[in-house]
Amino acid sequence: MLNLYDAVRDNPSYSKLVIGDFLFAEYTCGTDLKMLPNWTEKDYFVHVVTGKKTWHTPDGVWTVHPGETVFFKKGATVAEQHFEVDVCMLMVFIPDTLMRSTVREVVESLNLGTKNCAPTKVALRVESDVALAALFQSMRTYLVAMEKPPEPLVRLKLKELVMSVLTSGTNAELAAYFCRVAASDAPGISEIMEANFRYNLSMEEYAKLCHRSLSSFKRDFHEEFQESPGKWLLQRRLDHAANLLRHSRMNITEVALESGFEHVSHFSRVFKERFGVPPLSYRQEKDVEVKE
């Protein structure tokens, strides 16, 4: 899968501002692929200027039109391109270290309590926010400037954005997520894995999503789940596939791909090892049970 952050940062055709791991870019559709699987280890905002774009996530489909903004948690999505009108988007990738320190500073300075809620979805629509609009506008002007702004100025603008989200009350889920990022020194493995198990990522990429080295990821994973990440992924994907076979009309190939298996033959073999019958027979048996 495409690492979106790396692809945007390293593409010379995009106008962008890079300060450390912070990345602001004006992105135009650079692919003729209808569906583009991608992932990134950083949280990011997307603001659509022209055209429209659709993202498919495990918990929903998000079509974003001009003037609208959506926030994506670190992880994987499938971006769907619409070719009727040229797409122009503004993207802000914010590293956890910068977000964490900024949120902690704002919470302390305003004496705010922590905001608790259920885990947020992979994507969140962002209600109209003056600070966010100002950030996009001011950062966009830097794209044509000869010199990039100093890092303290970028931190100040991000602080204004965080302060607006935490105090406005119009983006409560996003505010709660900001507070969760600030409350921990690393992303939670369980939440990351549950949101991304169906994507065909390498073990190194899962470790990067969790902001850990591969060895630390495997150790922390085993402490939390009492099994290796490879074994957990296989069982979780098979359980998901079995659910799709029972409750969807996807064919076997679609079920395999939707569950994170790259090859249908491998999927069929491990499915039979787990459930005792091939996927098609499993579906037929369950259909009989339902009718009876």
Image: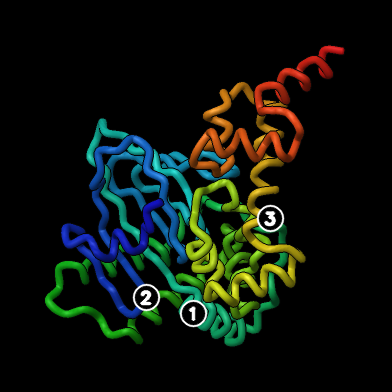
- Going from N to C along the chain, the mark reached first, 3 or 1, is 1
The residue that disc 1 covers is 97
Is the residue under label 3 in contact with that under label 2 (CB below 8 Å)? no
The residue located at (54%, 74%) in the rendering is 212
Between 151 and 253, the residue placed more toward the observer is: 253
Other residues around mark 2 within 10 Å, as few (<14) / some (14–19) / many (≥20): some
Query: Comparing marks 3 and 1, which lies closer to the viewer?
Result: 3
Q: Which residue is mark 3?
A: 232
Q: Secondary structure at mark 2?
A: loop
Dots 2 and 1: beta carbons under 8 Å? yes
Percent across and percent down for residue 251 are 56, 23
Q: Residue 250 has which mark?
A: none
- Residue 21 numbered mark, or none: 2
Q: Give the spatial CA distance, label 2 vs label 1.
A: 9 Å
Image depth: mark 2 or mark 3 in front: 3
Dot placed on the residue nearer the N-terminal end, 2 or 3: 2
Dot 2 or dot 1: first in sequence order is 2
What percent of the width, then of the height, locates residue 216?
59, 77
For this view, does 99 lie left or right of residue 19?
A: right
Residue at the right extreme, as displayed = 292
Numbered marks: total: 3
| Residue type beneath disc 2 | Asp
Which residue is nearer to you in this view: 289 or 87?
Answer: 289
Q: How much space separates mark 3 and mark 1, taking CA atoms?
A: 29 Å
Residue at 16% in and 80% down: 147
Identify the amino acid type marked 1: Thr
The residue type indicated by label 3 comes to: Trp
Q: Residues within 10 Å of mark 3 (few under 14, many from 20)?
A: some
Q: CA distance from mark 2 to mark 3?
A: 31 Å
Q: Where does the image place residue 34, in percent across and percent down from the top left?
A: 33, 35
- Look at the numbered disc 3 and give the secondary structure of its residue: helix
